[in-house]
């Protein structure tokens, strides 16, 4: 029920200390703390720890103090929401909560059924959906329970807005973060194109800084004869392996040491590779000649992409407009594609490459533009910074508010009970630390006090 609440506020309220006093707690299901007389027992904390472990908000089951502090802070937040009337909603809003809850439950049931469906049949689907409903019902998950969670989050959003007081990041704040973080990215990526492309293309990181040397290209991809292309790919792979092997052979006494392979492999020569490449090109010669002839007549390269091209990426309007960003050291593309993008025929914007053969087929590239290098504050990065600054401000105001609220309420911690619960959890995790099970210090260990 509190999963999303925890996800939003875990960082905000951990480590805050409410005013405490010492007291004795009952031995059976000991009380670990009270907030205005409301008890928080060990069993309640145990249940919360399980949830937090599942969501990876805590590392292990010994973190009673951390989880207890979270639960105390949650009580403070809940009380403040009620005090300010942020938990009061209209009939229309309550109905909207139920509708959203039903949608969430329906989606969860569908996802569960997708995972557990045993066969591709209507009966199997019905069984999987029924299994999902039974599973959620057994866990006590209902539309009403989810609706209460939605309602709690709505109240929390109101409290958020109240505490933020209309805060919006200023241009100066955004620029300050941009320059600081952007400088770090510049230092990291300026001379490491591989790392830059990996993080921005595969790591989901926005590009704050672009290294020098990037150009934008579009291309026409022609799919070649499969057999000819496979032959070229096999020869190319063998040729590269052969070159790597020759480079790695150690030199002894001025002569290369020779290895006797278990099975003699046929040497792949440059001529064989060139002939295989040419065979691929010849298989699409008519199309290639026609493309260059039409380009020489002044026809649009973009129009020819639409007519001849077989790269799905070039059907995306933004890719056609912006092109592919390529660097001489790029790791994102087939080496033949990258080499063609920086070949002698591609010296200035508007140039067209000779046809190049890669593992995907035949490419004819068009030099679209040079890409600006350096720091660039895009809309996506601006939003990323504003979200960060808002979350930071939210963290600050919540810490201040929780400290104030804690001083206004009666909060009691039972430290002995907390320590005992923590010790018991540590013992469950590390039973070998039990002193009764430790070897006697005077007892000789293996090899000690023995003669060889």
Image (cartoon, rainbow, N blue to C red):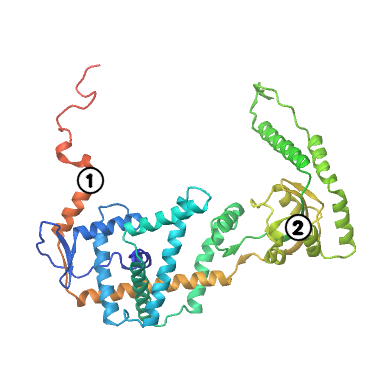
Asked if residue 334 lies left or right of residue 436, the reply is right
SS at circle 2? strand
Asked if residue 289 lies left or right of residue 228, the reply is right
Q: Disc 2 marks which residue?
A: 219
Do the residues bearing badges 2 and 1 touch, measured as CB atoms within 8 Å? no
Q: Residue at x 89, y 58 (%)?
A: 293
Q: Which is nearer the eye, 400 or 113?
A: 113
Residue 392 in view, yes or no: yes
Quadrant into which the C terminus falls: top left
Task: Give the answer, above or below, for where 294 lies relative to 95.
Answer: above
Quadrant into which the N terminus falls: bottom left
Quadrant of residue 438 within the rendered picture: top left
Badge number at residue 294: none
The spot of residue 307 in percent (x, y) is: 80, 60
Mark 1 or mark 2, which is nearer the start of the sequence?
Answer: 2
The spot of residue 287 in percent (x, y) is: 85, 53
Q: Residue most toward the top?
A: 452
Q: Which is nearer the eye, 383 or 160?
A: 160
Asked if residue 142 lies left or right of residue 277, the reply is left
Q: Residue at x 86, y 65 (%)?
A: 299
Badge number at residue 428: 1
Task: Give the answer, above or below, for where 101 lies relative to 238.
Answer: below
Q: Which is nearer the eye, 90 or 43?
A: 90
Within 10 Å of disc 1 (Cα), the crowding (few <14, some 14-19, many 20+) is some
């Amino acid at each position: 029920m509190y999963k999303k609440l925890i996800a939003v506020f875990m960082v905000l309220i951990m480590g805050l200390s409410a005013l405490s006093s010492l007291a004795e707690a009952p031995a059976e299901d000991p009380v670990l703390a009270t907030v205005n007389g409301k008890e928080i027992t060990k069993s309640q904390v145990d249940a919360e720890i399980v949830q937090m472990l599942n969501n990876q908000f805590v590392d292990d089951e010994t973190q009673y103090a951390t989880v207890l502090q979270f639960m105390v802070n949650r009580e403070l937040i809940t009380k403040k929401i009620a005090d300010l009337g942020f938990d009061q909603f209209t009939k229309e809003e309550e109905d909207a909560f139920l509708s959203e809850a039903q949608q969430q439950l329906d989606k969860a049931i569908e996802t569960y059924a997708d995972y557990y469906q045993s066969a591709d049949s209507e009966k199997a689907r019905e069984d999987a959906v029924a299994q999902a409903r039974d599973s959620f019902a057994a866990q006590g998950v209902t539309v009403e329970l989810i609706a209460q969670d939605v309602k709690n989050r709505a109240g929390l959003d109101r409290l958020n807005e109240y505490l933020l007081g209309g805060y919006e990041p200023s241009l100066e704040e955004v620029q300050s973060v941009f320059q600081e973080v952007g400088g770090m990215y510049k230092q990291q990526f300026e001379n490491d194109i591989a790392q830059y492309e990996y993080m921005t293309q595969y790591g989901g990181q926005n590009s704050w800084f672009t290294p020098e040397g990037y150009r934008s290209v579009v291309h026409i991809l022609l799919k070649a004869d499969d057999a000819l292309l496979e032959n070229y790919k096999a020869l190319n792979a063998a040729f590269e392996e052969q070159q790597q092997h020759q480079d790695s052979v150690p030199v002894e006494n001025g002569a290369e040491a020779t290895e006797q392979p278990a099975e003699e492999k046929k040497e792949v020569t440059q001529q064989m590779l060139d002939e295989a490449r040419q065979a691929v090109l010849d298989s699409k010669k008519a199309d290639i000649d026609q493309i260059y002839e039409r380009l020489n007549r002044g026809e649009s390269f973009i129009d020819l992409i639409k007519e001849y091209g077989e790269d799905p990426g070039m059907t995306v309007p933004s890719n056609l407009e912006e092109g592919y960003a390529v660097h001489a050291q790029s790791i994102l593309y087939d080496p033949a594609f990258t080499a063609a993008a920086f070949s002698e025929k591609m010296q200035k914007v508007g140039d067209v490459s000779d046809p190049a053969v890669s593992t995907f087929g035949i490419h004819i590239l068009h030099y679209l533009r040079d890409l600006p290098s350096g720091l660039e504050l895009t809309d996506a990065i601006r939003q990323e910074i504003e979200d960060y600054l808002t979350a930071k401000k939210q963290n600050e105001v919540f810490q201040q508010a929780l400290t104030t609220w804690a001083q206004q309420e009666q909060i009691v911690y039972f430290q002995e009970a907390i320590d005992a619960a923590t010790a018991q959890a540590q013992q469950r995790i590390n039973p070998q630390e039990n002193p009764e099970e430790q070897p006697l210090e005077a007892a000789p260990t293996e090899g000690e006090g023995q003669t060889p």
